[in-house]
Image (tube, rainbow, N blue to C red):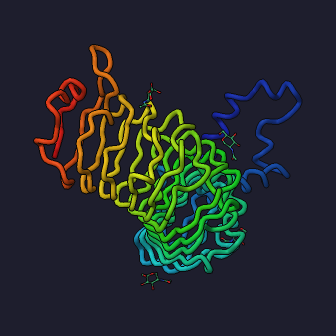
Amino acid sequence: MTPTMRLVIVVLSALLPLSLSHGRDPLSWLYGRQSQGYFASLQADMASRWCPDECDCPPAFPIAMYCDGRGLTAMPSIPSHIKYLYLQNNAITAVSDSALMNATNLVWLMMHHNQLTSEAIGKKAFLNLEQLERVYLQHNNLTSIPSNLPRSLRDLRLNHNKIEKVTPVDLEGMDNLTILYLHDNVVTDMSTSLKALTSLTMLDISSNQLTKVPESLPENLHQLYLEFNSIDSVPEGFLNRFTQLQYVRMSHNQIKDNGIPPNTFNVTGLVELDLSFNKLERIPLVSATLQHLYLQANQIKEFTLGSFCSAVDVTSFSKLLTLRLDGNEISREDIPSDSSQCLRMASTIEV
Ligand SMILES: *[C@@H]1O[C@H](CO)[C@@H](O)[C@H](O)[C@H]1NC(C)=O
Ligand SMILES: *[C@@H]1O[C@H](CO)[C@@H](O)[C@H](O)[C@H]1NC(C)=O
Ligand SMILES: *[C@@H]1O[C@H](CO)[C@@H](O)[C@H](O)[C@H]1NC(C)=O
Ligand SMILES: *[C@@H]1O[C@H](CO)[C@@H](O)[C@H](O)[C@H]1NC(C)=O
């Protein structure tokens, strides 16, 4: 018996004499059958410290495993107690059905900047990860969203891959998903895949090949980023259902005047609207509560004050702070002198 164990016994005998009155010896775990329990817990403790050679599991934060930036080409073994797994910046090419089998407590899975292709991810690879909340798979070679991603996800990043299509079954039931990054892929079709995402607040599908605004945009969005696509028109009333939407970015598309139904952007709540680098010839009607409007690099020929203010008096005027109109076909002389009443808040008007 080591001196430490002897000390433990002395301390325990001092602390636990009362339980003797219940007829049980508090030290029975030290001998007889119960001692198996002691060694089992010692083993469990060692298992919870076990870490594959190629990774680091800091003793001060034993539920995290760091395997990032080590030139790995295959998945390491993952002890089941790990919650936060860092595998980014490697050259991992595959995740087999069994690779994450024991990792049932994973909450974060960081696998960005690897060499994953969709074919090399097992259909059941993510199936049992019921605690998983955050998955980073950006900068890989995926051509589709991995199947059977856990419905518990809150943050899913798939940007900078080669994803062509997003289907409803990919995202169905992800009630808690709040962030979805799909930018810098080659998506042409989203069908109604976003419909079920009732908690989604941040959607970035910029730099893809969309020719129209995705259908069934989730109603709780705060940020909608669609810039650098090939969208030429927006659906009638497509911003009407939102109550939280503040940022709409649609720069670098092909939007023309006749692609914007009247009143599309006359919605309260919007803070920023970016329609720069499109094909507009007129300033669309915007809500008087909008604060930042970007229209640079279009073909706008006329400064229509009515786009900002239908009437001007003490209480009704535009809240616009930033207005960019540079790179259009108008000059400062085209701004009517009475605009200073309507645009009295604007600190930046670039023409
Ligand atoms: C999962 O755990 C079992 C039992 O501990 C072990 O035999 C197996 O190798 C583990 N699998 C992986 C992929 O880590
Ligand atoms: C992933 O894509 C890059 C760039 O296109 C390419 O160099 C690399 O070979 C691809 N890796 C795999 C595993 O397909
Ligand atoms: C969403 O989060 C809530 C609260 O944390 C949880 O009870 C629920 O099971 C989660 N939904 C899914 C689909 O995992
Ligand atoms: C814009 O919306 C406001 C508030 O809903 C409304 O009062 C106003 O008439 C609309 N402007 C036009 C030109 O329809």
Compared with residue 27, is residue 118 higher up or lower down, i.e. above or below? Answer: below
Count the numbered circles shown.
Answer: 0
Q: Nearer the viewer, residue 343 or 204?
A: 343
Q: Is residue 43 visible?
A: no
Residue drawn at x 59%, y 69% is 165
Pinpoint residue 150: horizontal percent, then vertical percent. Answer: 67, 57
Q: Nearer the viewer, residue 174 or 344?
A: 344
Pinpoint residue 328: horizontal percent, then vertical percent. Answer: 21, 54
- Position of 328 with respect to 142 (left or right) is left
Q: Is residue 256 visible?
A: yes
- Position of 51 with respect to 11 (left or right) is left
Ligand 3 picture quarter: top right
Residue farthest along the top direction in this orientation: 314
Pinpoint residue 220: horizontal percent, then vertical percent. Answer: 56, 39
Residue drawn at x 80%, y 42% is 28
Residue farthest along the left direction in this orientation: 333
Compared with residue 312, is residue 95 higher up or lower down, i.e. above or below? Answer: below
Q: Which quarter of the picture shows residue 193?
A: bottom right
Residue farthest along the right direction in this orientation: 23
Residue drawn at x 65%, y 36% is 10
Residue drawn at x 58%, y 78% is 94
Q: Nearer the viewer, residue 236 or 27?
A: 236
Pinpoint residue 134: horizontal percent, then vertical percent. Answer: 55, 53
Q: Nearer the viewer, residue 284 or 295?
A: 284
